[in-house]
Image (tube, rainbow, N blue to C red):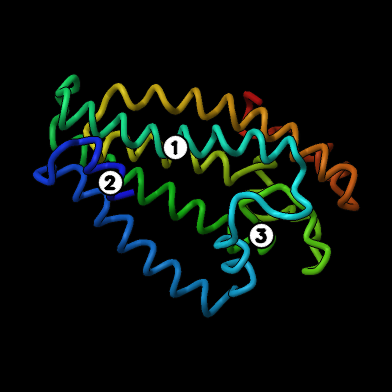
Amino acid sequence: MGAVIFGAAGTMDYAGGWLYVGEMVALSIVFGTIMVRLDPGLLRERLKPPVQKGQPLADKLILIPVLLLIFGGMGFMAADAARWHWSAMPSSVQWVGCGLLLGALLFIYWVMRTNSFAAPVVKIQKDRGQAVITTGPYAIVRHPMYLGALFYIAGTSLVLGSWWGLAVVPILALLLGIRIGVEEKTLRTGLDGYDDYARRVRWRLIPFIW
């Protein structure tokens, strides 16, 4: 992330970049340390590569543009704020972005503490006894990790000081919507009880909308 951000900014004298990287490093250390103790199995899954055995081809194909959008979006945000100076954002808004970023990551952490099977790729983890999770954020939407990701990208854009970077959020929502279709097909055919869960929890990504 640091290489992408400061490379795109064209300078190391970029307060928003240091603010973002500092917050991410600190939170990664805290959350990583907690996960090592509480759920090492999930941590191992989260650290595996984005292309894995047993992963549907459709998920491999959609995951590539998702990752390119996330990291490319970070580069665009940094270039916007520090190289091209298209956006003029008050520092107070960037600090609000820090709060939004923290909230998004705490929400994602809640998702992972609720669901020990929250792997980064679409697959049924039979070796770990995967079961349907219906509590916590999964009682609100069927794919809460993706909902948290949208707020994470919005927070990233604000911390980096880029108004234009917020345009990444709806594009990411569209790609995640496509991925949800792939994931739901896999879960409905390979995970007992998912159909019943989907009937009880209507919303896939955004409550009361979709």
What residue did someone put label 2 on?
Answer: 98
Q: Position of residue 210 (x, y in %)?
A: 66, 26
Q: Nearer the viewer, residue 136 or 116?
A: 116
Of the residues shown, which amino acid type is indicated by label 3? Asn
Q: Position of residue 146 (x, y in %)?
A: 57, 40
Q: Which mark is residue 203?
A: none
Q: Position of residue 107 (x, y in %)?
A: 49, 51
The answer to whether residue 43 is left or right of residue 74 is right
Q: Which mark is residue 70?
A: 1
Of the residues shown, which amino acid type is indicated by label 2? Cys
SS class, disc 2: helix
Please determine whether, in this image, residue 6 is positioned above or below residue 128: above
Residue farthest left in this picture = 13
Q: Could you tell me which residue is drawn at 86 percent across and 42 percent down?
A: 188
The answer to whether residue 205 is left or right of residue 75 is right
Q: Are marks 1 and 2 in contact (CB under 8 Å)?
A: no
What residue did someone put label 3 on?
Answer: 115
- Front tag of 3 and 1: 1
The answer to whether residue 169 is left or right of residue 184 is left
Q: Residues within 10 Å of mark 3 (few under 14, many from 20)?
A: many
Q: Position of residue 60 (x, y in %)?
A: 67, 40
Please determine whether, in this image, residue 86 is positioned above or below residue 64: above
